[in-house]
Amino acid sequence: MKQIKKLYHFLGGIQFALILIAASALMVIAGTLIESKTESHLLAAKFSYDHPLFSLLLGGFFINILLAALRRWPFKVKHVPFLITHLGLLMLLAGVMIKRQFGVQGMMFLIEGGASQALLLPGTYGIQIDKSYHALQPSFFKGFKLENENPEVKLIGYAPNASEQIKGWIKGDVAIIKGFKPFKVENEVGLIRQIDLDHQLWKVYTGRPTNIAEAIEKIYLQSTSIKITQKEKKIYNGPLWQLLETEALPAKLHLNFSSILGFVDPFLEVLGEKIPLDGSKSLRSSLRQVDLQNSPTLILLEDPNGDQYFFAFDPYGRVHVEPFRHDNLNSILVYDQGHRGYAMQKTLPFTSLPASRRDCEKADLYLLTKQLQNAFSKDSKLVPPLQVLKKACADQDLAHILMTFLDEWHQSGAWIYPKDRPLPDELHKIFSHLNLTLLSQEEIRGCHWCSLILSEIEQAIERGSDFIGLLEKRRWPLIEPIKQQEHGSLGSKVDLLSAQIFSLHPYLPDPDPTENDFPSYKAHLLSAYLRSQAIYLSAILPSLDELEQNERLEAANPLGVHEPIVLEAPLTLHHRVMPSKSKIEDNQPLIQLEIKGEKLSLVYDRLASGLKWPVSQGRSLIRFQPQVMQIPYRVRLRDARQINYPNSSQPFSFESDLWVTDLRNGRVEAATLSMNNVYETAEGYRFYLANISPPQETAVQRIQLIVNYDPAKYYVTYPGAIILSIGILMLFWLRPYKKEIS
Amino acid sequence: MKTLVYLVAFLYLSLCQANDFLESAIFTNTSLQELPSTYKGRVRPLEASSRLWLYDLYNQQQIKSAQKALFHLKTGTAIELEWKLFFFGHQPWDHSPLFWIHYAELKELLALNLKQDRFSYHELSKALSNKDFLKWLMTYQYAKNFHDIHNRAFSEKQELHQLAPRLWVELKGDDLILLSKPNDGVLWRHLPIGLTIAQGIRSHLLSFEKKHRVVAEEALKLMSSLNQYSQNQGALHAEATVEQQGSLLKLLPSRYHEGLWYSLNTLKAKSFDEEKKQERLTPNFTLYSDNLFKQIQTEYELLETALKKEDRAQVFIHTDRLVQFLNEGYASIAGKPYKEAYGKTIDYPTVMQIQIERDYYHYPLTELAILFYAIALILFVLSYKKPKLIKLALACAFVAFGCQTILLVMRCFILQRPPVSNMFETVIYVPWIAMLLGFILHYFLKNHLVLVASSVGALCLLILLKLTNLNSSLDNVQAVLDSQYWLIVHVLMVVGSYGVFLLGGVLGHFYLISSMIHGKETPQMAQNAKLILQCLYMGVAMLIPGTILGGVWAAESWGRFWDWDPKESWAFISSCIYLIWIHAYTFGYIRHFGLSVGAIIGLLTISFTWYGVNYILGTGLHSYGFGSGGDYFYYLFILAELVFLGAAYRIKSKKRVYP
């Protein structure tokens, strides 16, 4: 009895109170230190505030305060401040506990325009299968255990942290293209087999190389052959690798592959000229004709990080790549709302129309002719050489004749149309009617000098001379501006030189009177004039660059039908167990399940916003996510915005406009939430705006609401707080003075 | 009349050729200093904008007098530098030591002289392309992104767009590799693709980020400052368009975009006149009247011409007129709201607010307060011998308190909110409360000691404030704190209690020191102990209800009452500590000596709640006053206090005078 009495006095005594206060302070200190060290609030809570010992301390407080009060029985007036203070404290504690037991605390995620009535309960775990929910309880040894036993769902494995990758084309040892037998994948890159796509045979390569860029260059070199024509003479024809290896001609391949950006302006450099291998200028060259030939090829590669790349080469040597980074899929296909799974898609950028260099040139000529027809049909003033040509054309179409001539000239590959090159019939007729005497004497003199000087330089350059050196040797008086064009191409330097020669015609002597009336000689002189005005094919072609090459081909071939090739690969998940992080909030637990004999693994989807995956042959959809709770309100987000202080990114206000529908009576209310401004329903559900992202007003915003319901707040918690505050004031200022008086 | 003055001034100056005087006169002109401009999202007087702008770069609000020559400035004020930089572009200052670097570690990384604090643009732009520095910075940024992004798939590839667009790096195995770099960046040009940025970093990412956070953030800030600096082409040399706004002298409020202000050189922006089919000066794009805008535009043109001709008298005259017109324009919009949000607006400050803000920056009130507190303390000490001095000491303390009060009132008036929303304000507010309490107790108890104690506390904190160079600028309040009612109730109460505890703590020191001297309790000491008890009571009565009210605020605004956030936790811990002493004293476990020790230990926990949570722990939701630095000094302070307590206890137990 004596012992019990002693215990009673100890438990209600000041020593016990001091121990309790000190112990809880120490635990909280430890908690804050853990949190600062690991940046993990959850870990800190686990070892302090949420630790059973801490609950024990709180229980101790409860007993201590209660017994301390009982020990003072019968109460006297002087005990009032003490009693009030401690009553307030008890009420506060009770209020917090009631909220935890009977209240609601959840999150709701909404997208602008979207609505929801479901709360996610953070920190809870469960498996959502269609409409049914199987709650999981954290268990010390196994990670989780199912709350209710269920014969169909069995938990067979657990990892505290895992990563989840979405796999497309390549899955382990096979690559999948929908509609074809799987392709084997090994570490070595290799040709697997050929497949028929749109009546064309495509080679398919797969592999898992460590160096993607090297692997892809190797395949390209092996499969491509090249034909180079200069001035209508073939100067090389054979495999590309041979050209590069034997160094017969200076040539180099620059695919410029970057695993992030794909091909960055890939080109083939031949004799100092760049031949682009993709884009709207692909395969276009100005000085000589380069034709590449390739068998159409698809290459599916995976790098050591699991990122996949889809390469394609078209028959004419164009290259294309699209990286599929597992965290960044451009689009996905959903079949039967996910019950039949998900897929990704790839449309080949190549047209099915003939698209060789010559095909493209023809298309460009066609389009340019159309454009010029439009331009010439108006009462526009033509430059003198075109006026002369127009006269000669009589009733024939000037645009067509001009373009045909420019193309012939381009085919010849010379700076000026060669005087000895026969013209095609159509042009021959026109040029025989061409009356150059319509031009002024000076102009003709300029043409002659242009032709003389340029032909000589061109021949010298073909023999291997240097352009600037040649001009220097000949002491060309206007060499400075040409020299200043340090990085300009040879073509642009020739443009400048010919313009210079032409503009100098008043000061030049008359050339030798080699009067000659052959049409091709007239064409030669006319082309010299055009050259000095920078009118030649490769100079005017870029005006078409606004259109993609495929669009140009399609526009020029109204009868041809382009059928895009679309390939598809189903999406699957790949899970990798990772070491647990010190910030345990960031861990993504993984569970392994057995559902009706089917085994699968799932990674926790914290926001329940990811895909639901099909199970049981697509009869059900499943997701590992927090517990969901339905509330009797439907919330629709109309608009969310972050208003910044002007000229800064510091937010002035976060706001969102909602419509809240009470599902029991259908009443709709409009509400605006902002920081420090909460919406509360009549029943006591409160909606708080916790987060808006992204901050840009142009994007569709997503908000996070905190929704809670606290039945005890107004009756227990807040009154407790007030009573406690009053009690403290009374304790400190009523008692000491009384003590002093007594 | 004004023309006459100009004329006289002009004649006088052309006679004396005192051009320097004329130039200084431009920048010491009050109306120029009071010109409304914007900086960091607030409309402020130019005096404030330019001082803050300079402070951000140079860590001083004006050029040090020793360095004035290096900057070829006449007055060395921030306004002068900004004004000249604006007109002449950055080239003349490329070799002036304008950029302040705090951390020795950063100087080391950049291979800069460790003894130097400030560096020129020229030096830095060279130093920044240091390969090791760039590698270090990329590693930091990667580590930061790696932990910021909640990516389900843990993508090892990341674009460090914060540093430069198209800068991609990848974690390959344990190493960090450069994948791609911007095409045009000068800094990144020399780095080869495939470069190993860091070796064996995978498992150290978190610790790397934590360890280097402070220095790396300084480096990032420095880089953006340099970038912005290099974009000042100089109004005299560069064309201007309405779309391209400069960053200096933002003096023209836009008529089309609420809250947007244009740089002064936008006045010469040309636009196309659709009717006349020709270019002309852009018509009025400001909020000011068309007539006034025309005048402003004309004056600006004249000013530029004068500057080009280097005609200083003309420059003086046109600057003055331009300023006058701009001020006149602002008067027409002052006090009106310009940005609306739900239930609140942002208003243009009134002309009076602008003027007071200029005075706030112009007069060194904090320094005055420190001076007078110091004098007061010396006089208090002297008054032991010469009691007549006590009145003078009181007067000085009162003047110092007055300065402090003016400072707080100015801040309240300018920002229209209570002065407790950042570290600087609380460091002013806490000693103010201590002083206020000191005066009140002094009035009732006629005990000088309490005023001495509060003056000591105030002096210490204000000196600390100056030494740590805390951000003293007047800034916008964070959206979360934008609730007058709760700010007053919760924050004023809690932070106010710090002031009370501060007074109690200083009194505790006094008690222990006298106990060490006297070896026994004198009546004076007993009186002192009673004061300590009062302080603890009052402090606890503010701290606990204040904290609980904070819980109510949290419950009302964010939907949770208590979440063991570090600030909350430490408020709880300090409450517990004080409750222990109070309970122990009430039940007779300790006496006056123990109470004094308690007041000091309590003060230490309060200091941690106040400073340590923000600066040492650095996590949590109460991140409105986060910062860094000074932790070693803080540990030293704690250590010194503990040594002091130990010594006091030892002396006491030796003398065994107490029960």
Image (spheres, grey):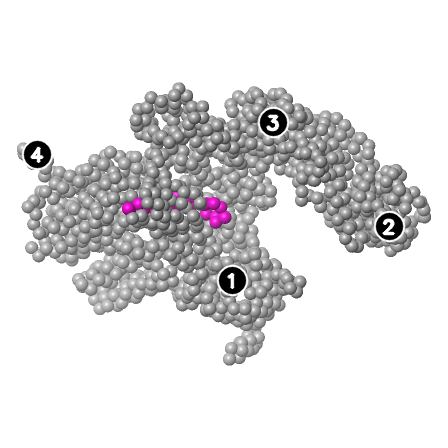
Element carrying mark 3: strand
**Circles 3 and 4: CB atoms closer than 8 Å:** no
**Circles 2 and 1: CB atoms closer than 8 Å:** no
Distance, label 1 to label 4, CA atoms, is 82 Å
Disc 4 is attached to a residue of which chain?
A
Which amino acid, by three-letter code, is at mark 4? Ile
Disc 3 crowd, CA 10 A, few/some/many (<14, 14-19, 20+) = many
Q: Is residue A311 magenta?
A: no
**x 14%, y 48%: residue:** A82
Q: Are marks 2 and 4 on the same chain?
A: yes
Element carrying mark 4: helix
- The magenta stretch spans which residues? A683-705
Residue behind mark 3: A299
**x 7%, y 33%: residue:** A3
**x 86%, y 50%: residue:** A391
Residue behind mark 2: A391
Q: Which residue is more in the foreground, A580 or A362?
A: A362
Picture quarter with the C terminus of chain A? bottom left
Residue behind mark 1: B255
Distance, label 2 to label 4, CA atoms, is 128 Å
Disc 2 is attached to a residue of which chain?
A
Residue behind mark 4: A4
